[in-house]
């Protein structure tokens, strides 16, 4: 579900174009229809966060768009819990953080909805156990979009492996994102 660059690059596309591009890109590593749908769901939440929506409102809007786009899909029933749960009220002991795409999505959204900073969101995701790198990455992407780059703790940035390389790649990516002449 590490689809954030595609989501960011095509966030302003019309819904069906956006969903198609996310599905296509995610199918490289997540070929199952359920996985592709989960990546689109994640992308829909990100789109609303980019527009400045708060996480609960962004999630609600994403649920509505997702339902309109996929309610007739055979895999739609697997998303019922995600669409119907009041995620923020679920006790931590009921959150599953495995490598299964719907667990990752559910856990990551729960972390975003139950914290108030980038750092606490990512730490909560990692401390759930299970597939910590995936859940931390997905939750961190959501938190990064919501709280912004400035919210990443400086101490984390200072100790990041290959930070110079990451900064070069990030700069190149943001140049691609910039509007043309």
Image (cartoon, rainbow, N blue to C red):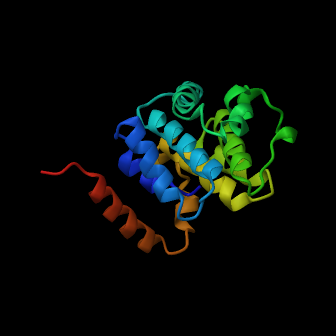
Is 17 on the left or on the right of 85, as rendered? Answer: left
Residue 76 in the image: above or below residue 33: above
Residue placed most toward the observer, 160 or 111: 111
Q: Quadrant of the N terminus?
A: bottom right
> Residue at 54% of width from left, 59% of height from top?
27
The residue furthest right is 93
Residue 51 point in image, percent of width and height: 41, 32
Q: Quadrant of residue 108?
A: top right
Residue 90 point in image, percent of width and height: 80, 31
> Residue at 55% of width from left, 68% of height from top?
160
> Residue at 54% of width from left, 50% of height from top?
141
Residue 166 in the image: above or below residue 95: below
Residue 176 in the image: above or below residue 65: below
Is 65 on the left or on the right of 135, as rendered? Answer: left
The answer to whether any part of residue 143 appears in the image is no
The answer to whether any part of residue 56 appears in the image is yes
Is 63 on the left or on the right of 106, as rendered? Answer: left
> Residue at 48% of width from left, 28% of height from top?
53
Residue placed most toward the observer, 112 or 156: 112
Is 148 on the left or on the right of 118, as rendered? Answer: left
Residue 36 point in image, percent of width and height: 57, 50
Residue 62 in the image: above or below residue 36: above
Q: Quadrant of residue 94?
A: top right
State how many labels appear.
0
């Amino acid at each position: 579900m590490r689809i954030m660059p595609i989501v960011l690059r095509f966030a302003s596309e019309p819904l069906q174009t956006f969903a198609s591009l996310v599905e296509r890109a995610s199918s490289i590593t997540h070929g199952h229809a359920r996985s592709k749908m989960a990546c689109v769901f994640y992308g829909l939440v990100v789109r609303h966060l980019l527009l400045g929506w708060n996480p609960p409102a962004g999630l609600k809007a994403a649920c509505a768009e997702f339902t309109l786009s996929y309610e007739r899909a055979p895999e739609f029933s697997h998303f019922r819990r995600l669409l119907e749960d009041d995620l923020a009220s679920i006790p931590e002991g009921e959150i599953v953080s495995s490598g299964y795409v719907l667990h990752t999505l559910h856990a990551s959204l729960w972390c975003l909805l139950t914290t108030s900073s980038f750092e606490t969101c990512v730490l909560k995701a990692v401390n759930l156990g299970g597939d910590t790198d995936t859940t931390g990455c997905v939750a961190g992407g959501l938190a990064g979009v919501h709280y912004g780059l400035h919210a990443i703790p400086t101490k984390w940035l200072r100790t990041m492996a290959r930070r110079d390389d990451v900064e070069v790649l990030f700069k190149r990516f943001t140049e691609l994102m910039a509007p043309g002449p």
